[in-house]
Image: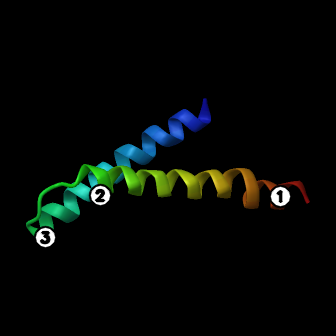
Amino acid sequence: MRYIFTIIWAVLISFVLSYVLSSMGGESLDLVATFVLAAVFSIIVFLLGDGMLREKKEQ
């Protein structure tokens, strides 16, 4: 369940970030780049949450 919520939040945050930056630059919103950014955010959160942070907590 936490993976689903992570993906949903990553998509929402990526959409807001892409919208604001594209509006500031005068460009159109690119949905493909938004979903790529969401995938990158999700992967980073998964790696941090399951890998690095959990290992430090157990020691």
Mark 3 to mark 2 CA distance (whole Å): 12 Å
> Is 52 positioned to the left or the right of 5 in the image?
right
The reply to whether dot 1 and dot 2 touch (C-beta < 8 Å) is no
Mark 1 to mark 3 CA distance (whole Å): 41 Å
Disc marking residue 25: 3
> Is 4 positioned to the left or the right of 27 in the image?
right
Horizontal and vertical percent for residue 37?
Answer: 40, 57
Q: According to the image, what is the colour scheme of the structure?
A: rainbow
Question: Which quadrant of the figure contains the C terminus?
Answer: bottom right
- Give the mark nearer the N terminus: 1 vs 2: 2
Q: Which residue is drawn at 35% across and 53% down?
A: 14
Q: Residues within 10 Å of mark 1 (few under 14, many from 20)?
A: few
Q: Which residue is drawn at 72% across and 50% down?
A: 50
Q: Residues within 10 Å of mark 2 (few under 14, many from 20)?
A: some
Horizontal and vertical percent for residue 54?
Answer: 78, 53
- For label 1, the SS is helix
Q: Is residue 24 above or below residue 57?
A: below
> Is 22 positioned to the left or the right of 3 in the image?
left
Question: Which amino acid, by three-letter code, is at mark 3?
Answer: Gly
- Give the mark nearer the N terminus: 3 vs 2: 2
* Near-viewer residue (39 or 21): 39
- For label 3, the SS is helix
Pair 1/3: label in front: 3
Q: Residue at x 48, y 58 (%)?
A: 40
- Find residue 22 and report its image quarter: bottom left
- For label 2, the SS is helix
- Give the mark nearer the N terminus: 1 vs 3: 3
Q: Residue at x 29, y 49 (%)?
A: 15
Question: Which amino acid, by three-letter code, is at mark 2?
Answer: Leu
State the residue position of label 1.
55
State the residue position of label 2.
17
Farthest residue to the left: give it.
26
